Amino acid sequence: MSEQNYKPDYLVSPDEVVKDYLIDKYHYDQSSSMALELASMELDIVENELKEIVWCSGMITPAIAAKLEKLGRPAHFWLNLERQYQEDRARLSGISEFQVDKTSWFYKNCKRQRRNGAKICSECPFRKSIERGEE
């Protein structure tokens, strides 16, 4: 199969990749707001904007991508990641249900945030499963 014909049946959300970089550089985890505060200061990104990206409700804009370069990847990496995510999300939106990997960190995190009263972002590939209460 050629790379040009490959169309994944899952989403890789930019927030997952940003979280990985924040974990590596700032030892970020959901329970520590200090790491996110430190990252937002060092990256020169408003903390709420960074939270929106990390929690799957914000987009990576060219301005944000330029600031994320401080994590060690060029701006075009972050912009391509966002572009690919948006393309795959649009393509997959015609599918009635995404394939749900219920062992993934992302799925478990979305469920935990929902239990804690957080709103699930409209783009979350697990939204339907979580709202139905599937385990």
Image (tube, rainbow, N blue to C red):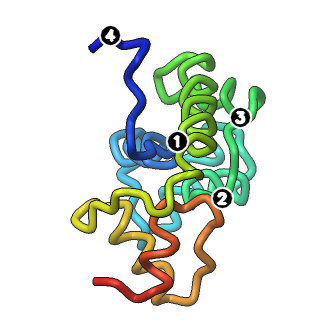
4 or 3: mark nearer the eye: 4
Q: How many marks?
A: 4
Q: Is residue 94 above or below residue 78?
A: below
Residue in the image at 36% along x and 48% along y: 23
Q: Which residue is mark 3?
A: 64
Instruction: Examine the rendered structure and indicate whether residue 68 appears above or below residue 56.
Output: above
Q: Pointer 2 and pointer 3: residues touching (CB < 8 Å)?
A: no
Under mark 2, the amino acid is Ser
Q: Which residue is mark 2?
A: 57
- Where is residue 90 shown, x and y percent of the image? 63, 43
The answer to whether 74 appears left or right of 102 in the picture is right
Label whose residue precedes the other's in the sequence (3 or 1) = 1
The three-letter code of the residue at mark 4 reads: Ser
Left or right? Give the position of 39 relative to 7: right
- At horizontal 49% and vertical 60% (from top left) the residue drawn is 125
Q: Rounded to the nearest whole Å, what is the CA distance between mark 2 and mark 3?
A: 14 Å
Quadrant in which the N terminus is drawn: top left
Q: Earlier in the sequence, mark 4 or mark 2?
A: 4
**Quadrant of the image containing the C terminus:** bottom left
2 or 3: tag closer to the N-terminus: 2
87 vs 5: above or below: below
Q: Which residue is mark 4?
A: 2
Q: Are marks 3 and 1 in contact (CB under 8 Å)?
A: no
Residue 14's disc is: 1
Q: As shown in the figure, which amino acid type bears the numbered disc 3?
A: Ile
Q: Quadrant of residue 61?
A: top right
